Amino acid sequence: MIAAQRPDRRSAKLLTIDADGRMQHLPRAALASLFSPGDLVIANDAATLPASLMGTHCASGQPIEVRFAAWVSVYDPTRFAAIAFGAGDHHTRTEDRIPPPPLSPGDRLELGPLVAIVERLDLPGLFRLRFMGDRTSVLAGIARHGRPIQYAHMPEPLALWDVWTRIAADPIALEAPSAGFALDWHTQTVWRQRGVGFATVTHAAGISSTGDPTLDVLFPFDEPYRIPERTAAAIKHTKSKDGRIVAIGTTVVRALESAAKADGSVRAGDGVASGRITRETPLHVVDAILTGVHQPGDSHFELLRAFANDAVLDRISAAFARHGYRTHEFGDSVLIVRRQRMARHVITTRAR
Amino acid sequence: MQFDMNLRGLRMAVTGGTSGLGLALVRLLVARGTRVAFVARGARAVEQIAHETGACGIVGDVGRKEDIYPIAMQVTGNLGGLDVLINNASSLGPTPLAPLADTECEELELALMVNLFGPFRLTKALFGALAASAREGRGAAVINISSDAAINPYAGWGAYAASKAALHHLTAIWAKEAQGDGVSFLSLDPGDMDTPLHAIAVPDADPRKLKRPEDAAAEILRSLVAALPSQAAGPVAVNP
């Protein structure tokens, strides 16, 4: 498959699979005409932090790249769980990067205008850092010196405007909630006119890869999220009228299913999504997912097994290859309405 | 100053917040219990006004494309979201003012960058946060500071006036487009004020005949309150 190299909102494609496994190839702009009055589309409106900072490991004088891997306490930008690389940049695949100089608690890192202290080592390759200074000055330093986490397949470095979706609001994602690149304001206007609802969650999407297989098996890390009262109310209303809940991206699935109650409604407020969604995970809230084009084995693809069986997913993979769908964060999209058996189960549960 | 509207708890950002109208807005908003972030180019002035008012100061130049997203990130990161954006920072273009035939292309470009592209880019970067505020029922608004030079052709004001005319029209169109998203757009002319910008444009003006920026700021906030839904901000008892 081809890796998309730039955000390309206007020519993207969309593969749709309905509950009976029927496929359709559409331009992604057709998203505006999908779904029915009474359905509710839910997207992740997290904006993305520039979570990669270049600098120096003072003890050794060696260059270091720090990447934020997870929040220690969400909305507190002075402390992060982080990974690091040595000399070099994103043109080298993360798997092949030179390791950072050995880190010890108390080590000082100079990252542009910021100074950070290594607080402790959590796992080999994963450590906690604390920035010196107050929240405002640390945010200013991250904003000015940080760069979005880069991808080796992109010829040009990504700027912050490349990794913010149209709906980006609070900057708490560490990598872009990339399914949201499929959304624009025009699409929302058309949905509104057609009676299709729109709501958001704010989910701190974490990093997708460290390049270290022993760390990557731990993915996804715990991710904090916030579900507004109005979103929870809209879900309840939609479910009561037998409308469908469409999640834009895997982070929305994680947040909603993590906050799910048995009746298919969700708890509003702050929460933390932990663990993976797998083929065994019962879905209480989400009826359909729009996501990017991923390959079997990717954690994003494996999550789809909760929505469709292996035979359907094999056909999807084959269709991606045959029709030249573009992978990665800025590629094409796929919409999967989950198989009927699960849908009936939920309707039965709700009718009780 | 007497002011009869409650803006407590609103999260607001003001560009050009270290002098003139912007500074008057920051002071008035802080006094009204608003959570304010302001933007300006000069690090020292930003630090000083942040210290004086307790508002969150952000160093940045809205005329520079590279500064826009870092500014937006600091606004929402510090305030935890955004309800109101006031695009106030302005450039006169050539100073002293000059006829168009004497205006360098770069001077027109500067006026357009600061007065048109800056508000466009920053509003676009923060539109997600504003729409999120509207979805949660808090209301959201963008105020673009205009000028009567946007409407009336005054000789010597070409670069500034052309940029403000474009901003005025951009605001009117955005107002229509964003209605469904719950974000209000206002283009407001504060009038001729006793500000550093006006002193550069019209050095021999009599300051006593000019509006005080504090009064213009209060008028702007009245227009803002009228544009927001009643649950976002409402009339309260007057505390002179």
Image (cartoon, grey):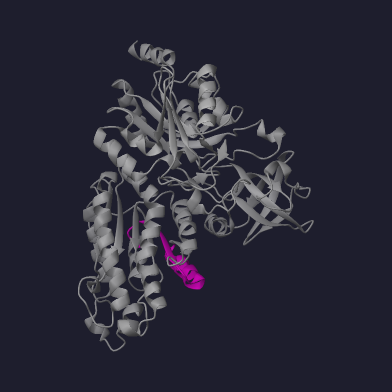
Do we see residue B27 in this rendering? yes
Location of residue A238 with respect to B36 vertically, above or below: above
Could you tell whether A120 is left or right of A68 in the image?
Answer: right
Could you tell whether A42 is left or right of A282 in the image?
Answer: left
Q: Is residue B35 magenta?
A: yes
Image coordinates of residue A253 in percent, x first then y, are 47, 29
Could you tell whether B105 is left or right of B142 in the image?
Answer: right
Location of residue A271 with respect to B194 vertically, above or below: above
Given residues A235 and B219, the one toward you in this image is A235
Given residues A322 and B190, the one toward you in this image is A322
Count of labels in the image: 0
Residue at 29% over, 32% down: A196
Residue at 70% over, 34% down: A213
Image coordinates of residue A90 in percent, x first then y, are 65, 50
Residue that sits furthest to the front in the current view: A322
Image coordinates of residue B169 in percent, x first then y, are 25, 62
Q: Which residues are magenta?
A: B31-54
| Picture quadrant of residue B111 | bottom left
Image coordinates of residue B87 in percent, x first then y, are 35, 63
Do we see residue B2 in this rendering? no
Q: Is residue A321 magenta?
A: no
Quadrant location, the N terminus of chain A? top right
Quadrant location, the C terminus of chain A? top left
